Image (cartoon, rainbow, N blue to C red):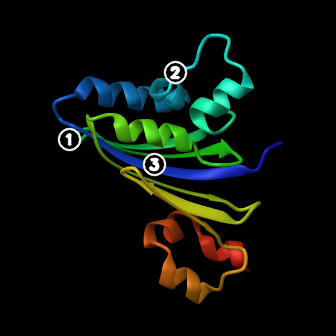
Amino acid sequence: MPNNCENQLTFTVAKSNPNLFNRLVEAMEQERFFNEICPLSDSASIDEILNKWDTKWDAYESDCIIDRDTQTATFIFFTAWKPPSKVYEQMHKMEDITHYVATYSETGNAICGIYTDGLKGEHDVAEYTEDWIEANLPDCVIENHNLYEMIT
């Protein structure tokens, strides 16, 4: 059984493309979001999956907060071992996704990080103090993933 990596992704789609927004929301609700962004072949091997998504399975145990007026969605979900960084890289290339922020934490290996509009930051928090976390990590990472539990 893998370590669960907790993820939170918020993104906004251009108002000129409601079909894309609806398609992505439906894909997340059906736990096939990664395959919608980075499609796999019908007979995908584990190597192909890891190469396309950077994690073994699509998002699971997900929850959604959707604002159709602004075409902004927040998804909270788990992945196996680490975040789906290749999916975020592909989202950055999609011109109708106007903004995204993804945070993650994997408590088994005491790592956390953030992706925002193509930029990535990752931290190993196992040896850090509460003061270091407060001074060096974005509030959204600390709040979304309750990092203080990782250092106690």
User: Which residue sits at x=31%, y=26%?
Assistant: 20
Report the quarter where the N terminus lies: top right
Residue 84 percent coordinates (x, y) = 57, 42
Residues at marks 2 and 3, CA–CA distance in whole angstroms: 19 Å
**Residue 9: which disc?**
3
Q: Residues within 10 Å of mark 2 (few under 14, many from 20)?
A: some
Residue 49: name its quadrant: top right
Residue 88 x/y as whole percent: 46, 42
Residue highlighted by disc 2: 39
Between discs 2 and 3, the one toward the N terminus: 3
Q: Position of residue 115 (x, y in %)?
A: 46, 54
If you read the primary sequence from the N terminus, does the residue marked by circle 1 or circle 3 appear first?
3
Q: Amino acid at mark 2?
A: Pro
Give the side of residue 76 with respect to residue 17, left or right: right
Residue at position x 69%, y 34% from top?
Answer: 56
3D distance between C-alphas at marks 1 and 2 = 28 Å
> Helix, strand, or loop for circle 1?
loop
Provide residue 17's location: percent of width, then percent of height.
21, 28
- Residue corresponding to mark 1: 69
State yes or no: discs 1 and 3 in contact (Cβ < 8 Å). no
User: Around disc 1, counting alpha carbons within 10 Å, would you say few (fewer than 14), some (14 to 19), or many (20 or more)?
Assistant: few
